[in-house]
């Protein structure tokens, strides 16, 4: 009997990609065979994002493409847009199943049961536990991603994510450690811990625990070289947490600490749980303790109420802190959030100009950061993808810089020591060394 086929289109964040890998694992255990998105398949799953209006546009385009290239397939739409706006998704007549984040774990059951109902979207606000997901397939990837937390306890004025993901829920430490051992045993020396509100890890568990305690336990996993953290809010960088991440031999020297604005007035309007002084203290302590710290942040420009003076404060703060990269987003109003009721105070042209200024500043700081790495030997994880232009290898350093270099074909998935030889505007070059 020929196995049923399934393909996936994943929009949005890294957590969505992990969710897709878990869905793929479950369906393959039920006899499905995964094929690339765009090829003929019996089932097509579109895992959506809802964080911005642009993300929603991408969702719509992916659904239309799936329906066009696979008109006979059962078309499933899941993810954050399906959870927050199921009625909008239902307007696509080609969609056979709409499955919210609360019901993702039931996808195999829904496909096999041929249920009559089209929409399966439960109340995510009622979710209190994080399901123990099957170990996601990560074949062909050097790095492995491990979801340790979902949901968020904060209610930032601009953010739709709590409505899509629910309250903060953590995976039990024993489960995290078991999965980490399996991933390392499968040949993945780097594990990325993912979540929505990762710094809140463990606060909902009984007995209560912390992300710092989990990191200490992960140090004992044999063969684990790097634990990389996804986004962590500055408010979670307690003295204990800072001591752990600056001292641990396995925590990667790279942190993504969301900023959003360099103006305290705008941070208050956004309902962010920190101010500029707290942010600066955290970054300066990390930078003092970790040589060549990789530091990333998110920035939103054009938030309602942002004046030219507020924007200048953001620019000045970015100029003075040691960022190695930035993710810059024009503000996007999301229906159902507090900020969606605020009146816009900047026209589209002004917001576009501000975003352009921040992105150019980000490019300058990234180039400056990489130039300071020239001459240093960095331990890198060799990625599975080769450089398209040269066919050379690409390695990811602990501080999150991709370095291109020549080397033998057996290196992908392994650690290598690479001396950085040049930092150009769009690439970093290196050479293998035995040092």
Image: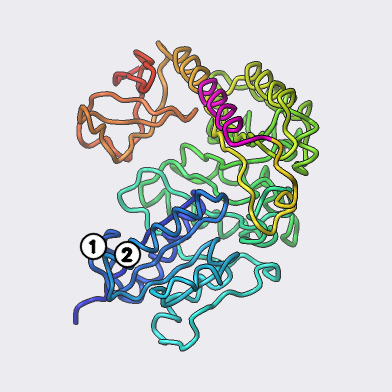
Q: How many dots with numbers?
A: 2
For the N terminus, which image quadrant? bottom left
Q: Secondary structure at mark 2?
A: strand
Whole-percent x and y of residue 377? 40, 17
Q: Secondary structure at mark 1?
A: loop
The relative height of residue 23 versus residue 111 in the rendered view (above or below) is above
Whole-percent x and y of residue 45? 39, 67
Residue 358, disc: none
Does the segment drawn in magenta span residue 352?
yes
Residue 251 lies in what quarter of the image? top right
For the residues labelled 2 and 1, say whether their Cβ atoms are less than 8 Å apart: yes
**In the foreground, 378 or 337:** 337
Specify which label sits upstream in the sequence, 2 or 1: 2
Residue 7, disc: 2
Does the segment drawn in magenta span residue 99?
no
Whole-percent x and y of residue 368? 49, 14
User: 46 left or right of 321?
Assistant: left
Colour pattern: rainbow
CA gap, disc 2 to disc 1?
A: 8 Å
**Which residues lie in the magenta part?**
346-362
The relative height of residue 193 versus residue 336 in the rendered view (above or below) is above
- Tell me the residue at 60%/35% (across/down): 298
Q: Residues within 10 Å of mark 1 (few under 14, many from 20)?
A: few
Whole-percent x and y of residue 149? 61, 55
User: 188 left or right of 257?
Assistant: left
Q: Which residue is mark 1?
A: 39
- Tell me the residue at 40%/10% (across/down): 375
- Tell me the residue at 45%/87% (across/down): 115
User: 261 left or right of 353?
Assistant: right
């Amino acid at each position: 009997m020929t196995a049923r086929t399934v393909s996936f289109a994943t929009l949005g964040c890294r957590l969505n990609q992990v969710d897709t890998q878990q869905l793929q694992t479950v369906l393959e255990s039920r006899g499905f065979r995964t094929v690339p998105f765009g090829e003929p398949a019996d089932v097509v799953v579109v895992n959506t994002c809802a964080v911005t209006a642009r993300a929603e546009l991408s969702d719509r385009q992916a659904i239309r493409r799936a329906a066009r290239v696979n008109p006979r397939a059962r078309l499933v739409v899941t993810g954050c847009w399906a959870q927050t706006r199921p009625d909008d998704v239902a307007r696509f007549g080609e969609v056979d199943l709409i499955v919210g984040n609360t019901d993702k774990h039931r996808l195999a059951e829904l496909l096999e049961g041929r249920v009559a109902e089209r929409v399966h979207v439960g109340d995510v606000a009622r979710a209190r536990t994080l399901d123990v997901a099957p170990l996601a397939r990560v074949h062909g990837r050097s790095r492995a991603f491990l979801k340790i937390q979902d949901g968020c306890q904060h209610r930032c004025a601009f953010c739709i994510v709590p409505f899509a993901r629910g309250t903060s829920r953590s995976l039990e430490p024993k489960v995290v450690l078991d999965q980490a051992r399996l991933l390392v045993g499968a040949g993945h020396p780097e594990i990325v811990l993912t979540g929505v509100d990762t710094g809140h890890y463990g606060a909902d568990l009984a007995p209560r625990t912390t992300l710092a305690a989990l990191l200490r336990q992960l140090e004992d996993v044999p063969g684990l070289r790097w634990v990389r953290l996804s986004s962590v809010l500055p408010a979670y960088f307690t003295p204990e947490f800072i001591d752990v991440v600056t001292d641990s031999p396995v925590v990667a020297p790279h942190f993504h600490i969301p900023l959003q604005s360099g103006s305290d007035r705008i941070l208050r309007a956004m309902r962010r749980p920190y101010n500029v002084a707290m942010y600066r203290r955290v970054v300066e302590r990390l930078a003092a303790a970790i040589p060549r710290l990789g530091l990333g942040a998110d920035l939103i420009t054009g938030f309602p109420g942002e004046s030219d003076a507020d924007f200048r404060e953001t620019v000045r703060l970015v100029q003075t802190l040691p960022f190695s990269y930035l993710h810059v987003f024009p503000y996007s109003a999301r229906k159902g959030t507090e900020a969606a009721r605020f009146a816009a105070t900047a026209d589209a042209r002004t917001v576009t100009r501000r975003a352009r200024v921040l992105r150019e500043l980000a490019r300058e700081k990234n180039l400056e950061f990489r130039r300071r790495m020239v001459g240093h030997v960095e331990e890198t994880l060799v990625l599975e993808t080769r450089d398209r232009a040269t066919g050379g290898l690409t390695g990811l350093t602990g501080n999150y810089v991709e370095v291109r270099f020549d080397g033998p074909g057996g290196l992908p998935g392994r650690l290598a020591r690479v001396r950085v030889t040049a930092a150009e505007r769009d690439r970093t070059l290196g050479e293998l060394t035995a040092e």
